[in-house]
């Protein structure tokens, strides 16, 4: 077996230089061991709270040993932001200080197990803020948008859907027409709020003094009757030019959800979202056997135990996890890769209670994966755009990211302080049946 010395390699390069001028430059450096540069160290990890749209946002800032170099990540948990702040400031900060900021996967894996118990929403959101911030740093160091680090674009922009609703069918029609006029080709239709609570009558639990007067009431029967009529009405008015989506939001019994998905199948929905609660995902097998309505699921998922089986058994068509809820970009890109092999597309959760940094993370991943499905649109107020310079922008139904390195989104901390959290704690308000039984979620 022949061996080659560094001198022989340099000599070979010299011969090539005689044949091709491109090799005439000094290539001997390629044969020399590179000097080890000092690793980029994490010096501080902290949570920043702000609410420029009156929604409790939480952004994690990771500072480094390179002056002026930092990263931002989204850890927003609208209903429980203060425990996330504690997890970031009191636990992830001391855990991460002194670690190499380049080693994203190693930091994620070790931070993930540092609490011993894991896959809960508070710690996952804290971990997401850290993870996304490290990806932001990586992009800034490379001088590239994060989607380039993931392999580059698969599409020119991110196709989005928007929400149409009305208290009756005419209001719904007007809302659909308005959104279609804004350039959207995918529209989610709802008659009123989730479960059409405006159609409910006689909340007997209030008469009995059960619960609180502020608790909401929903009767599933009117909702189950109006939803197929809404699909029929919109299809008759707008034809097949638009794709229709609907969110059941797990508010009805599993068999009612199965029957509803069967009933609307003829109207060709783009997807029906969250027919079951995470605790009832075993019903997907029955639903899949009875109709071909496309299904989206995952908004409330925290753990791989919830999504791996649904994807690998082809029981859903769209995976809809909240990226910060599952632990950040590092997890979401693995979910996307798993889903690709089972023809499951992405539909990442993207409501108002995701920071502009989180929306940018959604969009960068959307741009880079081949099995992208659709993205939830977002509209930022001027105050939010001022606090977060470089927000993703909506145009003609598409989301466009800032092409600056990293996420392309910054944070004005001084301005952020001018938008403190609302005094209201922000917990999910109870919704009840007539007799007071609590409805999920």
Image: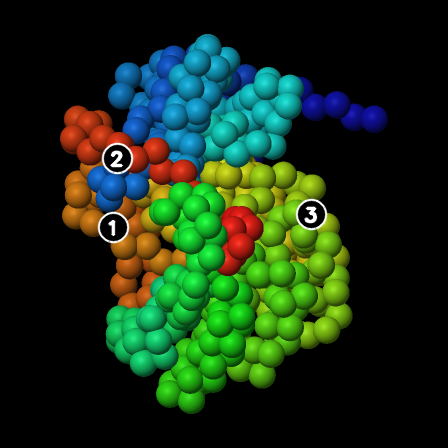
Q: Residues within 10 Å of mark 3 (few under 14, many from 20)?
A: some
Identify the residue shown where x is 60% and y is 69%: 294
The mark closer to the camera, 1 or 2, is 2
Q: Earlier in the sequence, mark 3 or mark 2?
A: 3
Percent position of residue 121, x then y:
52, 34
Say left or right for 351 vs 7. left
**Residue 422 circle label:** 2
Does residue 360 appear in the picture of this structure? no
Q: Earlier in the sequence, mark 1 or mark 3?
A: 3
**Residue 103 circle label:** none
- The residue under label 3 is 308
Percent position of residue 241, x then y:
41, 83
Q: Secondary structure at mark 3?
A: helix
Identify the residue shown where x is 33% and y is 71%: 166
**Whole-number angstrom distance, CA of label 1 to CA of label 2:** 18 Å
Q: Closest to the observer: 335 or 77?
A: 77
Say left or right for 314 vs 72. right
Image quarter of residue 198: bottom left
Say left or right for 230 vs 33. left
Q: Are marks 1 and 3 in contact (CB under 8 Å)?
A: no
- The residue under label 1 is 380
Percent position of residue 288, x then y:
71, 67
Percent position of residue 220, x then y:
53, 65
Q: Earlier in the sequence, mark 1 or mark 2?
A: 1
Identify the residue shown where x is 30% and y is 41%: 55
**Whole-number angstrom distance, CA of label 1 to CA of label 3:** 33 Å
Q: Residue furthest right?
A: 1
Q: Closest to the observer: 233 or 298?
A: 233
């Amino acid at each position: 077996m022949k061996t080659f010395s560094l001198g022989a390699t340099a000599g070979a390069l010299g011969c090539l230089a005689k044949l091709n001028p491109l090799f005439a430059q000094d290539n001997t450096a390629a044969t020399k061991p590179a000097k080890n540069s000092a690793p980029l160290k994490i010096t501080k990890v902290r949570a920043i709270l702000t609410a420029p749209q009156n929604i409790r946002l939480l952004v994690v800032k990771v500072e480094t040993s390179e002056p002026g170099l930092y990263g931002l990540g989204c850890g927003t948990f609208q209903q429980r932001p203060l425990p996330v702040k504690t997890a970031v400031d009191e636990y992830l900060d001391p855990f991460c200080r002194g670690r190499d900021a380049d080693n994203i996967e190693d930091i994620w894996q070790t931070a993930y197990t540092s609490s011993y118990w894991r896959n809960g929403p508070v710690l996952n959101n804290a971990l997401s803020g850290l993870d996304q911030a490290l990806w932001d740093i990586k992009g800034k160091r490379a001088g590239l948008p994060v989607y380039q680090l993931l392999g580059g674009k698969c599409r020119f922009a991110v196709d989005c859907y928007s929400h149409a609703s009305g208290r009756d069918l005419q209001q719904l029609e007007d809302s659909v027409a308005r959104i279609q006029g804004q350039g959207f080709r995918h529209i989610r239709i709802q008659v009123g709020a989730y479960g059409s609570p405006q159609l409910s009558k006689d909340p007997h639990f209030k008469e009995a003094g059960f619960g609180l007067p502020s608790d909401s009431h929903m009767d599933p029967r009117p909702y189950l009757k109006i939803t197929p009529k809404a699909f029929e009405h919109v299809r008759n008015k707008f034809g097949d030019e638009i794709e229709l989506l609907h969110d059941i939001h797990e508010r009805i019994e599993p068999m009612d959800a199965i029957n509803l998905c069967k009933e609307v199948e003829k109207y060709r929905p783009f997807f029906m979202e969250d027919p079951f609660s995470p605790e009832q995902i075993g019903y997907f097998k029955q639903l899949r056997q009875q109709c071909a309505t496309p299904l989206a699921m995952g908004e409330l998922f925290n753990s791989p135990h919830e999504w791996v089986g649904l994807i690998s058994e082809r029981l859903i068509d769209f995976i809809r996890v909240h990226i910060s809820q599952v632990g950040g970009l590092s997890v979401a890109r693995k979910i996307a890769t798993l889903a690709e092999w089972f023809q499951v597309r992405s539909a990442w959760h993207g409501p108002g209670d995701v920071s502009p940094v989180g929306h940018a993370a959604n969009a960068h991943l959307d741009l880079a994966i081949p099995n992208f499905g659709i993205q939830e649109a977002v509209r930022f107020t001027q105050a939010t755009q001022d606090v977060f310079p470089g927000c993703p922008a909506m145009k003609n139904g598409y989301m466009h990211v800032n092409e600056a390195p990293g996420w392309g989104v910054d944070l004005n901390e001084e301005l952020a302080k001018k938008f403190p959290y609302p005094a209201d704690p922000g917990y999910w308000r109870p919704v009840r049946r007539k007799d007071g039984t609590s409805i999920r979620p």
